[in-house]
Image (cartoon, rainbow, N blue to C red):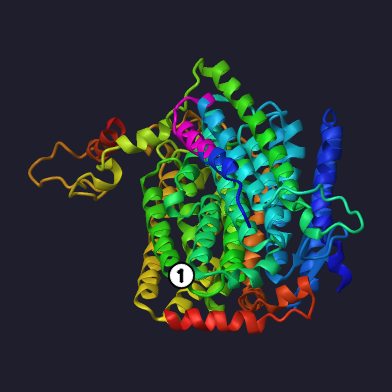
Amino acid sequence: MSINLTLLIVMGVLYACGIYLILERSLTRVLLGLMLLANATNILILATGGYAGLAPLFTKDTDPEAYSDPLPQALILTSIVISFAVTAFMLGIIYRTWVLARQDEIQDDIEDRRVAETPSFDAEDDAIVPLETSEFAVTPANSSDHTHPEATETPKKAPHQEGGSA
Amino acid sequence: MNLANLSPLAVLLPILGAALAFLLIRHHTAQRVVSIGILSATLLLECLLLISVWDGGTTSVTLGGWLPPWGVVLVVDQFSSLMLVVSTVVSLAVLIYATGQGMADGDQEAPVSIFHPTYLILVAGVSNAFLTGDLFNLYVGFEILLTASYVLMTLGGTGPRIRAGVTYVVVSVVSSVLFLVAIAMIYGATGTITMADLAIKLAELDQGTQNLLHVMLLVAFGIKAAVFPLSFWLPDSYPTAPAPVTAVFAGLLTKVGVYAMVRTETLLFPGDTLNVPLMVVALLTMVVGILGALAQSDIKRLLSFTLVSHIGYMVFGLAMSSVAGLGAAVFYVAHHITVQTSLFLVTGLIERRGGSSSIDRLGGLAKLSPLLALLFFIPAMNLAGIPPFSGFLGKLGLLQAGVELGTPLAITLVVGGVVTSLLTLLAIARVWNRAFWRKPEDAEYPDPVLMTPGNVGVLPRTMVGSTAGLVVFGVALTVFAGPLFQVADGSAGIMLDRSAYIHSVLGDSVEVPPLAQPEEAQTGDAK
């Protein structure tokens, strides 16, 4: 199988530009990059068909070698249609981002940023557990003031409130 | 046996349904009836297909009058028909759930009229990817389901969804381009794209070319399956979509990637050339995924990370390339589709009842809604692999196969699998303790919905019903695990043997074993 050098160079340039463009932060450039990648791939598929030849319409007494391979062309046609649909959809999304945020840039994931900034200390799991966890009042024998049940409630609430404010 | 000739209907019925649903775009009730009816009919058909190949037959259907090495073929075997049935059961449950949600919200939340046609096209794409025996047609199947998923992901066009949609679309398009490049190279190297023909012709190439093509295909499928270094797009993009959409994506889309990886590893490139890298990747996927889950406070994001993590188990089973390992992986895929989808559906219900899906805000749901707690508890324990459930059986099968293999790396993976399972339990227990067991007032930022005593937000019966149905289906997978494991092991045997697949496509006269067997033996000795 021989290879068409011009096609190959064009393909390489398209791939290089496409990859450069999809690394950009601007959505329109990303879209252009994706289109270049899709077209570079189409050229690659075309290159796998080998020599350019006659249109593959059957006529008697023609050498089978003289036809060009129809399958890559069918594949390219399908892939053009698919990339057309995806491009149209991307344009829709880009327009929508512009309408919503007045900017043409990829935005950060807020929740992801939040998780990344969360300290490793988790109030519920890592806070120091108060030693006395009994529900009953442990009153020193000599102090007779703390006999009301309400008195035991206040220290028990404390750790939760602490967690809430943290 | 001729039942398999109906298999193109599994793709055509949903597409026809989509067209009908699109015509009925102004008639919501008729649209619902059409889409649910069509999907039920598809499910019935796929059950018939599964029964016809239950005992291990493989049949192929030639489309368009072109004979196999040139035209497109659909192949029905145990693995593909099992995947079809499970995926359609899940899609049907999610469709009913989404219909319930649409009716309850008065179609305010999202333009549901476009939801039904798009959803049916997604199902058609998934069925096409499972059935096809042609590499380019597999690409088309992927594109059908991806394009439908782009629309579903950005349904309603709100800010967060568009943001997540951009990431998702760009990553998916890049992976599709990689796949297409791989197809072009394979065609250039062999002159065919029919998978059965490739199985014979790829073996004739020299080892370097084979490895290049092999790795390109695996990378393209790995992005779709969210295998570790290629998985970062998933937890970023899935959680923002509407609850039913996230559920069906989590259940189906990554598994289509896994399915394609299985076909690549067993049919196109048999042998164990890439088993070691695959095992390392599987281990990293499991551990990194679950550590990510532990850091999250949003249930949807947490579940997305467990999804990534559990893809690792399937890759592990695949990388062992033994009947036991692959069989367990097949069983695990079926189990995981069901369980992961039901968990996402339940999360949708939690969000509806509790007003939030963040475990910093939720609390006391077990008391407020015991049914919801039960619906969460069963699939959650199933996911973590607690003994009676199918998750345990699948993991047990994988671990046994790993121990049987006995290499140091396989043993490491067995240990990693157990650790991941325990960490999954920890992540799930965190959700359970916070969202269900503690008092609502104990939450860090309690949601007002939970604090008002009289306010009982009644969940729509259709949504609860479909979720319950899926949970019951998950339990049924446990109850009928015996026959299911038998089919899974049978399909693994057939896939590793390859001759049934190739013969059914190319005819019995093709000599497979003399070509395939020495190749396998050679690589086996070399390792």
Please tell me in which quadrant of the rendered image residue B18 appears. Answer: top right
Residue type at mark 1: give it. Asn
Work out which quarter of the rendered image holds the C terminus of chain B and state it.
bottom left
Where does the magenta region start and end? A13-28
Task: Tell me, yes or no, whether the highlighted magenta stretch contains residue A29.
Answer: no
As drawn, the residue found furthest toward the right would be A60
Near-viewer residue (B508 or B419): B508
Identify the residue position indicated by label 1 in the image: B275
Left or right, A70 with respect to B135, comes to right
Q: Is residue B160 above or below residue B263?
A: above
Task: Tell me, yes or no, whether the highlighted magenta stretch contains residue A18.
Answer: yes
- Residue depicted at 58% across the width and 63% down the height: B333
Q: Is residue B308 above or below residue B192?
A: above
Please tell me in which quadrant of the rendered image residue A92 appears. Answer: top right
Left or right, B25 with respect to B373, comes to right
**Is any atom of residue B96 visible in this view?**
no
The answer for which chain carries disc 1 is: B
- Residue depicted at 49% across the width and 33% down the height: A17
- Residue depicted at 52% across the width and 50% down the height: B223
Q: Secondary structure at mark 1?
A: helix
Residue A39: x %, y % from top left = 62, 38
Q: Is residue A50 above or below residue B463?
A: below
Left or right, B392 with respect to A126, comes to right
Please tell me in which quadrant of the rendered image residue B472 appears. Answer: bottom right
